[in-house]
Amino acid sequence: MDLSQAGFGEKSRLRVLLDHFSVIEDTRQPHRVAYPLAELLLLTVCGTIADCDDYEAIGVWGEQHLSFLRGFLPFHYGVPTGRWLTIMMNRINPALFSACFTGWVRACWPDRPELVAIDGKTSRRSHDRGAGQAPLHLVSAFATTSRLVLGQEAVEDKSNEITAIPVLLERLAEGGGLKGAIVTIDAMACNGGTATAVRQAGADYLLAVKANQPGLMGEIERFFDDPATRGIDRCADVDKGHGRIEQRTVTVAQEVDWLSGDRRFPGELRLPDVASIIKVESKAELKDRCRLETRYYITSAKLAAQTAANAVRGHWGIENQLHWVLDVVFNEDQSRLRKGHGAKNMAVVRHFAINLVRKADEPLRQRSGLRRKTKKPAAPQRTTLKLRRKFAGWDLPYLHTVLAAKSR
């Protein structure tokens, strides 16, 4: 069936998604294919949106909603079982699948991101002790302002995030995708190679400086402790919630010529185009104690204190709005996928689902039960991502709206 007949025009996110799925190579012999790759991937994405967390549940959901799926693709032979889905997802090239995801995000949301947080997450139960296989560790890029997953790259065995980040940056930078953005990364990436990769991508870096770079950290500490230091910008704010009151003071200095001198001692860290250094002091008052913390950052952008504060706080969006969601809403840490490419590809499918569900309209919810009599109108209800997934499984028209939303 033509997608345009089902209300999916040329610019719908589902149409764009299927167009990008079509570039993934199917290595099976065409005359023996009962379940085309596009049908398998559509079923997997729809089932994941509809609150299914493994291939067995996705296959059963597809059997129960076959008429819905046939509104988009033929499914001449019905839907495959969970075992068949597992075999096929294990075979798909994860590099092509990740590139397909990045291209789809760029086509649906073409605006360039302002703040991009990069961080890694481990799928804890994806290990295979019998085969000596470590759990999957995936480095993801997250647009903190628009709350979209932009891309991901798996960390190879016996390696670390430092090798995966440049590969991810290169993919995201295609077509100027990172031009003008600020890329925030934790202290592990505070090295010349990563900073250079960010600059070559047309973006500015903002890197945490911790004890793994003791020389640089010591110099920045002494600079801010010097009472003669001038040319600094400062801002402060207070945040109350979660049983604590937190006061934060952000200090930015742009007079950093002393970090770019020609004379260096052996092994000294060199970062390209350093423009500002940042000091963040936080004081958290809890019920039974007070916690003080000082953090330092270095960046290639000339930032005002308020802009720096927003960028530093925005980095934690990848933990709260992506990693936490994957663990709590999508049960990623409980997944036992560990053979072939299944764990890597299913992680990408979850990213497809997160972006589609998060950008969908609010489901229509009728208030029921007793309400206190008041002249004020009922306050609008926000639906969590967990409930949106359940709505998609309960209410097929809502799932239809999630898929039929127009790309920008």
Image: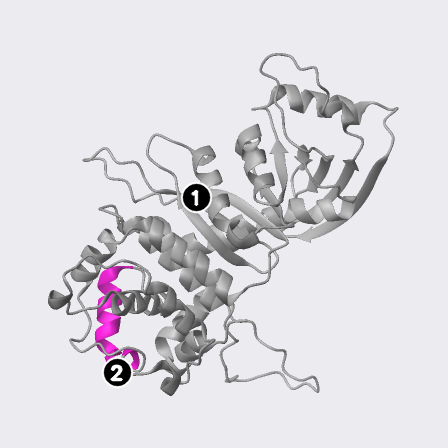
Marking on residue 121: 1
The residue range painted magenta reads 54-69
In-front residue for pair 315/179: 179
Q: What residue type is labelled 1?
A: Lys
Q: Which quarter of the picture shows residue 77?
A: bottom left
Colour treatment of the image: one colour
The answer to whether residue 305 is visible is: yes
Residue sitting at 62 percent across and 40 percent down? 205
- Disc marking residue 130: none
Closer to the camera in the image, 339 or 382: 339
Marks 1 and 2, how far apart at CA: 37 Å
Residue at the (25%, 56%) spot, across then down = 89
Q: Quadrant of the C terminus?
A: bottom right
Percent coordinates x, y for residue 165 in the rendering: 48, 39
SS for tag 1? strand
Q: In the picture shown, does residue 168 fall above or below 273?
A: below
Q: Does the magenta stretch include residue 335?
A: no
How packed mark 2 is, by other alpha carbons closer than 10 Å (few <14, some 14-19, many 20 or more), is few
Give neighbour class at mark 1: few <14, some 14-19, many 20+ (Cα, 10 Å): some
Q: Earlier in the sequence, mark 1 or mark 2?
A: 2
Q: Name the quarter where the N terminus is drawn.
A: bottom left
Looking at the image, residue 22 lies above or below residue 258: below
Residue 99 is drawn in which quadrant? bottom left
| Marks 1,2: beta carbons within 8 A | no
